[in-house]
Image: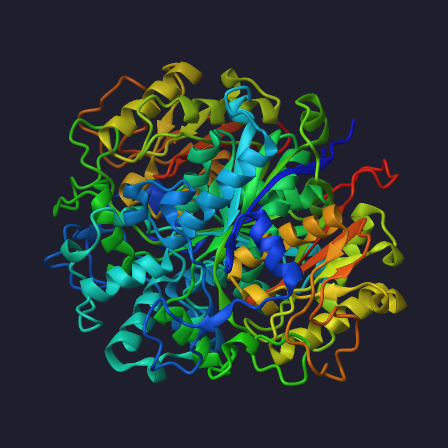
Amino acid sequence: MTKRVVITGMGVTAPGGVGVPAFWELLTAGRPMTRSITLFDATPFRSRIAAECDLHPAAHGTNTRDTRWLDRYLQFATAATTEALRGSGLNSVEEDEWRVGVVMGTALGSATLLEQNYMVMSDSGAKWQLDHQYGSPHLHLAWTPSVLGAEIARLSGARGPVHTVSSGCTAGIDAVGYAAQLILDGDADVVVAGGAESPISPATVGSLDAIGVTSSRNDDPEHSCRPFDRDRDGFVLGEGAAVLVLEELRHAIRRGASVLCEIAGYATLSSAHHMTALTTDGRVLAVAITQVLNQARLGPAEIDYISANGTGTRQNDLHETNAVKLALGQCAYSAPMSSIKSMVGHSLGASGAIELVASALAIDRGVVPPTANLAAPDPDCDLDYVPDTAREHRVDVALSLASGFGGFQSAMALRRLDSGRVETSRL
Amino acid sequence: MTAAAVITGVGTVAPGGVGTREFWQAACAGRNLLARITRFDPEDNPVTVAGEVRFDAGALIENRYLVQTDRATQFGLAAADFAMADAMFEPPALNPFAAGVITTSCVGGAESGQRGLGKLWRYGPHHVSPYQSFAPCHAATTGQVSVRDTMKGPCGVLVTDEAGGLDALAHARRAIQRGARIMIAGAAEAPLCPYALAPQYSARMLSESADPDTAYLPFSHGASGYVPAEGAAMFVVESAADAAERGSRPRAVIAGHGATFSAVAAYDPSGEGLAMACRKAIAAAGCQSQDIDVVFADATAVPAADRAEVTVIKSLVGMKVPVTAPKAGYGRAYASASALDAATAVLSLEHGIIPPIPALAEPIDELDFVIGAPRRAELRTALVLARGYGGMNSALILRRPGH
């Protein structure tokens, strides 16, 4: 019998709220959480805006030791995992621990904590040789991103495959896609998967300044992230985490779990064009979308909602609009497509997972979140971007897109389980 | 999901050998290639000995990639070239969407990262290079290989600590089983800079010995941690059917892989997770533990971890199967360590020769360690082991084609 992968639990930590209810309320209210950076003094930088999380780690499952020694993204992920596991009703004691896996995505890992330590160990950049005695006594917990997978595995009681994916801005979708493949290939019954990122640091802001991809609308932070708008001028950094509990359908049924939706298709391709630039035609992303539709045995008319990558850069929004048109033809015009980055910013390796949570909620609640700050659409971006106000809309199939540095183009389809289909997909 | 995935090309960049033939000769010679660090002045550093690669980047990497890549990515680009030449494959593929790239590393482009941080903190934001936005990222090697060689198919970037090299091969096999025709997979690592080394000292796993001859002695009573190294190993992976159609020579079959997690800080002294990874890999390969002809050990030289590994190997295959760890001669190159071990295993199967552990005066156990000189043996099935500091365990079974 062919396997199917379903989502049975979700957790999210995002700017403006911890937990799925607060997150959904924020999205459906269309409220941007972008603000002037408070995490460090951003005065010398070109872009000084971000969507920051206000998380009190102790209140969300992180103990005192970890609050002190683990970078913020691990605290976000801890909160999201705790919520997702609770929601799934998964009892780790009753599971075969060797059949429970973890795949988490992050672009930068503990870069923020490492930078803070670097600054001290190098005497503010004066020395190439670092004096490690001035570093944190637990700095080894920061040195590689695989710490993320390991921390979430400890929390989940997982002893199967535990992997971290670091494919930049598509890492969140890619982690969930990889997790689904592990289940389909029989390597695990349950995989806790998602993404986490805390990139708001001088090094990240500085390097994005250097290529001019972030918004410099510093005097109006709330309206700075404007996907598909004529006056968009770049993306706005965000931070956060999202975690999904994936399991094989029969496993979920056997333990009486409530199923949110199914993962119906996933593809990740490389545009092989440039490390940061995108082609205008969006061809590779279009191929990824087509591959996802084929896996899910869906036609273009069956897509009810598209969760856009929608970063708000000049290039991305045009690239993505053209990719969707190329893949869906005329149907591109009838599927609502919105970017929640307009509200919660771009949290790099976390955003793909956060947007999957939004897509699953759109299926579950019959509401699609809006694109905030879309006052005057770019004439070349002529799809239905759900401007400013959430919309009641039945969603059986949602398509989530991501695209990032390195040329990675990822797409995933989520499908309501009771939508009358019994075909199985092969991710 | 039965399409057999085969390795048709191997490319290595390692201390003692840039190029696969050079690497193999150095491994078989069993010389100790460790030396005092020259990449930076290690005076005042706890770790002063490492395995460095003598690499002429200008001769191997095109200028436009040279300026925008970290040393790790340069290793990866060169190793991918060697692997593709070995497989007699010249990119671009006929269908670029059926050709993909999957790489792994622990520290990404750490040296570029440190250079960028230095400019930012010392001179200010206006001195940060545009390449800083991607050169230090873990995703850079996959991205640059895919751009250079026009590979538009399934791509991926894994980070599973030391186990990554084996996990990348397993992931490439997943892509092949889902219809990709050709995959470049492997690891690239260049961690010999202060920014990559300093965060590790608090774990107390690295050898602080200043004597290159005794700094890294896995499975020995004198073991005092491992010596870091740099390098890369890349593979060309194809389905057996595609390899036959292309007329390329299958060098080894990726027969089985198992990955588990030890929920114990550092290396689990019980070895339970590693043992389960081995059992999963053997079951996936459809073979028995008696079929294993050689074991490539993880060999951390952390005493408790070495003992755990010996226990796992002994209970799995007994005392009569040869066990080796050529990395004792050139150091532990993190994610590339397991990829280089897999490369060595492919070459061993092909040549019927097991490269040795250079020196092992006082072994902690009576396992059949291959010491000092290479050993000829009829090899059909190799088991490669890897463990990450964070608790990741990985086991890979490689088989000689036709067996």
Q: Position of residue A313 (x, y in %)?
A: 60, 77
The part of the image, by quadrant, that contains residue B324 is: top left
Q: Is residue A214 or residue A16 the one in the foreground?
A: A16
Q: Is residue A327 above or below residue A69?
A: below
Q: Is residue B332 or residue A14 the one in the foreground?
A: A14
Identify the coloring.
Answer: rainbow
Q: Position of residue A96 (x, y in %)?
A: 54, 21
Residue depicted at 81% across the width and 64% down the height: A327
Q: Position of residue B209 (x, y in %)?
A: 13, 44
The part of the image, by quadrant, that contains residue A179 is: top right
How many dots with numbers?
0
Residue depicted at 44% across the width and 17% down the height: B316
Quarter of the image for the N terminus of chain A: give it. top right
Most extreme residue toward the left, as rendered? Answer: B44
Q: Is residue B185 visible?
A: yes
Q: Position of residue A369 (x, y in %)?
A: 69, 61
Residue depicted at 45% across the width and 39% down the height: A152
Q: Is residue B151 visible?
A: no
Q: Is residue B2 above or below residue A56?
A: above
Q: Is residue A263 above or below residue A212?
A: above
Q: Is residue B281 or residue B121 the one in the foreground?
A: B121
Quarter of the image for the C terminus of chain A: give it. top right
Residue A337 located left or right of residue A235: right
The part of the image, by quadrant, that contains residue A95 is: top right
Q: Is residue A94 or residue A408 the one in the foreground?
A: A94
Residue depicted at 33% across the width and 51% down the height: A142
Residue A395 located left or right of residue A120: right
Q: Is residue A201 above or below residue A21?
A: below
